[in-house]
Image (cartoon, rainbow, N blue to C red):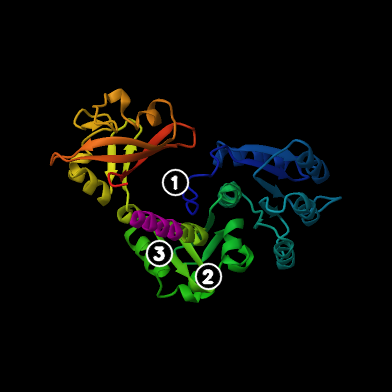
């Protein structure tokens, strides 16, 4: 199963791509050389005109970080930052400038610069700059990977037919799909970041809490059915724990449970009818083997249910005759048309001699039962004693 809460290793391994913008060509050449020393795998792009740099970003240049000077003539670093932010709101932007006033630093931070670094003499400043670049790009890539993963997982879980929600290790909602919103009667926006126990206080000290906490403590998945009174719903729940939290799939089985109970009652009713019927009833499989016999059939045949169910309808152990006492061949057994020609048999008369040696006259009816595909599944036989009729 995919763990919604675990991001895994989704950060890109591609080289860091840096765009350095500075109107001083000498500074650009130095930057390319020294940054290349401290970031040997990086791809360094440079521009001396911020407007050209902006156009390149719009056209065909994709980077992980921008390093920009402040004072660049027609467009200063903060104007350039604003132009970048209009297009790429989260792209790391480091202001690398010789202008070191607190006013500029404060303005840069207010404008949304990712980092601020003052230029100084010597090559060491590029080691610091390289470190800052690695840090901001690492965070940027991780956040982007997380966002992409969450979007992908959101798409996956929105397509899941079951309702779904995810909880973090502190029992707070991190995701609820559309079906989950319907069944919980709350929007995802209302739930994300909130404690499941606060949002659904009736779940406290219930089977839901017991199962969820046990799953988290044991780190073993759990499946259960439980009724939630406030929603008047019986839920079937599958919960999968991880170190990061709990993934919960659930569905409304209220109607299904009602049908199951009705089917159970119907089955119990049919079982009572079967056992208390005044006529003998036999159930045969599609090969003709007897699989069940009710109490009346046992009484009529005077052999045990075990003996009956160890025979087939055409067993030579049956001693059957016609109405006049003439022995029937197996081809003449009255139930045979139900198997060979898929015919309904009605009130066929036959004679039977029981183990006590008593002969009696009986009436037999047989009904073939089919699968949904039309194949013979079983045959039901009823037998009545008409000796005194």
Magenta run includes residue 269 = yes
* Mark 2 lies on residue: 232
Q: Earlier in the sequence, mark 2 or mark 3?
A: 3
Whole-percent x, y for residue 257 in the image: 46, 60
Q: Is residue 355 above or below residue 256?
A: above
Q: Residues within 10 Å of mark 2 (few under 14, many from 20)?
A: few
In this rendering, does residue 198 appear at all? yes
Where residue 236 sits in the image (x, y, percent)? 45, 59
Residue at the far right in the pictured view:
74
Local crowd size for mark 1, using a 10 Å CA cut-off: few (<14), some (14–19), many (≥20): few
User: Residue at the spot x=27%, y=29% of the render?
Assistant: 314
Q: Are marks 1 and 2 in contact (CB under 8 Å)?
A: no
Question: In the image shown, does 291 or 204 lie closer to the viewer?
Answer: 291
Where is residue 6? Give x, y as percent. 47, 51
- Specify the principal SS of the magenta part: helix
Mark 1 or mark 2: name the one nearer the start of the chain. 1
Helix, strand or loop at label 1? It is loop
Q: Residue furthest left?
A: 356
- Front position among marks 1 and 2: 2
Start and end of the magenta stretch? 260-273
Q: CA distance from mark 3 to mark 1?
A: 18 Å
Q: Give residue 1's mark.
A: 1
The dot on residue 212 is 3
Front one among 246 and 185: 185
């Amino acid at each position: 199963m995919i763990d919604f809460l675990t991001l895994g290793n989704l950060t890109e391994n591609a080289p860091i791509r840096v765009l350095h913008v500075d109107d001083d060509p000498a500074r650009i050449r130095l930057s390319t050389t020294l940054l290349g020393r401290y970031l040997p795998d990086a791809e360094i792009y440079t521009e001396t005109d911020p407007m050209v740099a902006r156009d390149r970003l719009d056209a065909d240049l994709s980077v992980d970080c921008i390093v920009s000077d402040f004072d660049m003539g027609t467009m200063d670093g903060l104007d350039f930052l604003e132009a970048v932010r209009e297009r790429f709101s989260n792209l790391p932007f480091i202001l690398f400038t010789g202008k070191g006033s607190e006013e500029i630093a404060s303005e840069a931070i207010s404008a949304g610069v990712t980092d601020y670094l003052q230029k100084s003499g010597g090559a060491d400043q590029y080691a610091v700059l390289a470190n800052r670049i690695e840090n901001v790009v690492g965070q940027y890539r991780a956040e982007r990977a997380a966002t992409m993963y969450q979007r992908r997982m959101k798409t996956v879980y929105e397509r899941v037919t079951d309702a779904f929600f995810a909880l973090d290790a502190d029992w707070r909602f991190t995701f609820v799909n559309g079906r989950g919103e319907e069944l919980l009667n709350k929007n995802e926006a209302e739930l994300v970041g909130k404690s499941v126990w606060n949002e659904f206080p009736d779940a406290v000290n219930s089977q839901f809490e017991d199962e969820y906490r046990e799953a988290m403590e044991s780190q073993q998945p759990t499946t259960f059915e439980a009724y939630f009174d406030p929603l008047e719903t019986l839920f079937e729940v599958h919960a999968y724990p991880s170190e990061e939290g709990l993934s919960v799939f659930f569905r409304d089985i209220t109607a299904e449970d009602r049908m199951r109970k009705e089917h159970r009652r119907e089955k119990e009713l049919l079982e009572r009818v079967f056992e208390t019927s005044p006529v003998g009833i036999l159930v045969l499989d599609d090969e003709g083997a007897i699989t069940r016999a009710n109490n009346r059939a046992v009484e009529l045949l005077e052999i045990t249910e075990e003996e009956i169910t160890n025979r087939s309808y055409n067993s030579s152990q049956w001693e059957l005759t016609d109405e006049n006492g003439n022995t029937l061949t197996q081809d003449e057994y009255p139930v045979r048309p139900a198997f060979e020609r898929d015919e309904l048999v009605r009130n066929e008369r036959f004679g039977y001699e029981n183990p006590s040696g008593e002969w009696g006259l009986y009436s037999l009816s047989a009904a073939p039962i089919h699968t949904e595909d039309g194949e013979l599944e079983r045959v039901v036989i009823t037998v009545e004693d008409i000796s005194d009729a």
